[in-house]
Amino acid sequence: MPLPGVEAAVTTILDAHVAITAAGHVAVDLYDGCFLYNFDSRQMWLIDLDEYRPGPFTLDAGRLPGSRRYMAPEEFVRGAVIDQRTLLYTLGRTIQHLLDTPGGWRGSPAQSRLATHAARPTPEDRHPDVVKPVAAWRSTCSA
């Protein structure tokens, strides 16, 4: 898929989560299985969204459900705060997953820096919410 199409698909995912966080919720169990791309219409669809919770919240279990590849480290710690920083980690991993290929990174260096910053292991090292990184993402897109 050409890079502008991938960027548009990522933008759809990010924009949806700006709206979701504006409504006061954070994603739980968001991973690549929630993304369905229609190649005929060139549209990204978010599907099988099992759970969004009002956030922030404190994890009262040993871990949250989800794919380990997309889960922030705090999602495995009882008593951890789950908030937009946690969601930002998942969105950073999503960008990494969609732009990294066996042939190497196909996005720009700015997109790589943005995704890497979003997926930092320590929540305090990430942006406090998704708004600023999504705005930064838009400035990196080629189309």
Image (cartoon, grey):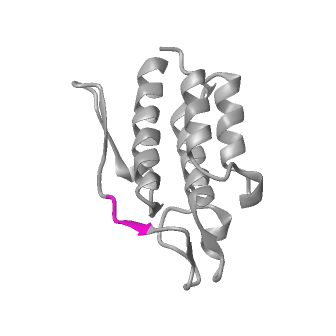
State which region is magenta.
Answer: 49-53
Q: What's the residue at 59%, 22% (across, down)?
A: 139
Quadrant of residue 136 in the image? top right
Quadrant of residue 35 in the image? top left
Residue nearest the viewer, comparing 140 with 47: 140
Residue 7 magenta-highlighted: no
Residue 104 in the image: above or below residue 33? above
Q: What's the residue at 45%, 33% (across, down)?
A: 11
Percent x, y of residue 45: 30, 41
Q: What's the residue at 71%, 60% (across, down)?
A: 123
Residue 1 shows in the view? no
Residue 53 shows in the view? yes
Residue nearest the viewer, comparing 101 with 12: 12
Percent x, y of residue 105: 64, 28
Image quadrant in which the N terminus is located:
top left
Residue 13 in the image: above or below residue 62? above
Residue nearest the viewer, comparing 15 with 44: 15
Residue 3 in the image: above or below residue 34? above
Residue furthest top in the image: 143
Residue 78 relative to residue 57: left or right: right
Residue 79 in the image: above or below residue 17? below
Residue 41 relative to residue 127: left or right: left
Residue 108 relative to residue 94: left or right: right
